Image (cartoon, grey):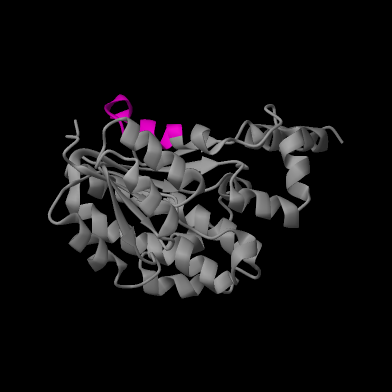
Amino acid sequence: MTDLKDVAIVTGAASGMGEAAARLLMDDGWPVLLCDLKTGPLNHDTKNAGGLAEVLTADISDPDFGQTLLAALSGRRIGALIHCAGLSPTMATPEHILEVNLAATIRLVNTVRPHMAAGGCAVLFSSSGAHILGSSLDEQINRVRTPEAVSSLHALATDSGSAYTISKRAVMLLVEREARAFGTSGARIVSLSPGIIDTPMGRKEMEQQPIMHKMVEMTPLPRTARPEEIAAVAVFLCSPAASFITGTDILVDGGKIAVLVGAARQDDLSGLGE
């Protein structure tokens, strides 16, 4: 069981899922290190956190971010990491999306692994899009084990949308590979795959990709998720109640993938009857 003297780290903590996760962790009494590029919202949170919040203003894609993070920890063990920071398809070029969503995540995992507390957990955000992509590219993606090797995926990521889904599929595979190494210190690592969320990033994607509205309408729960609903699952995964969950992905998508998988299965069955 983690000690609440251990620190929780939240990346992308200035808004959306990161902000919601940080608030829930502080409600549970965790001391939280809030990491983001933006200083304003984070500084506001520290004033209302009862001394539980510290701010680290830094870019996770900076190759030196790991050393900056360790300096901020000042020798404390990591009881929880909720890694929300990342780029959506409309935010950057394919190359930059792969750099931020994957290369920076690999570096972050390498940084925190030796400093995880027994009973601690790292939650990395993937996406339901990684489930839509499926396993067809897993062999190529799974060869990428270092930040430097991420450039080998440029040929597969022909646009920003494919770069996003490939990067998130790679996060799922990273978690599978890392589970044993985290387990040697009694720690866990999990990925979490949300569906469409009502955050500033999610709303921007829906404005630019009208098909996302149709995807919301077709799900069993035909609405976007609230950030708190996703954050609550991430915080649960860091709690003792989830102490036997590691090396896997948790899908929190309102049933979107279930509908898509069911439709594909029906198509396959129809084909058999022809």
Which residue appears at 74% of the width and 57% of the height? 208
Rendering quarter of residue 26: top left
Taking the view exactly as shown, the residue that stands out farthest to the right is 274
- 59 w.r.t. 54: above or below: below
Which residue appears at 30% of the width and 45% of the height? 179
Q: Is residue 71 left or right of residue 256?
A: left
Q: Is residue 248 visible?
A: no
Which residue appears at 26% of the width and 32% of the height? 29
Q: Position of residue 152 (x, y in %)?
A: 49, 74
Q: Position of residue 3 (x, y in %)?
A: 17, 34
| Residue 234 is inside the magenta segment | yes
| Residue 200 is inside the magenta segment | no
Dominant secondary structure (helix, strand or loop) of the stretch shown in magenta: helix
Magenta residues? 232-244
Q: Quadrant of the C terminus?
A: top right
Q: Position of residue 183 (x, y in %)?
A: 22, 42
Q: Is residue 26 left or right of residue 143?
A: left
Q: Position of residue 83 (x, y in %)?
A: 39, 50
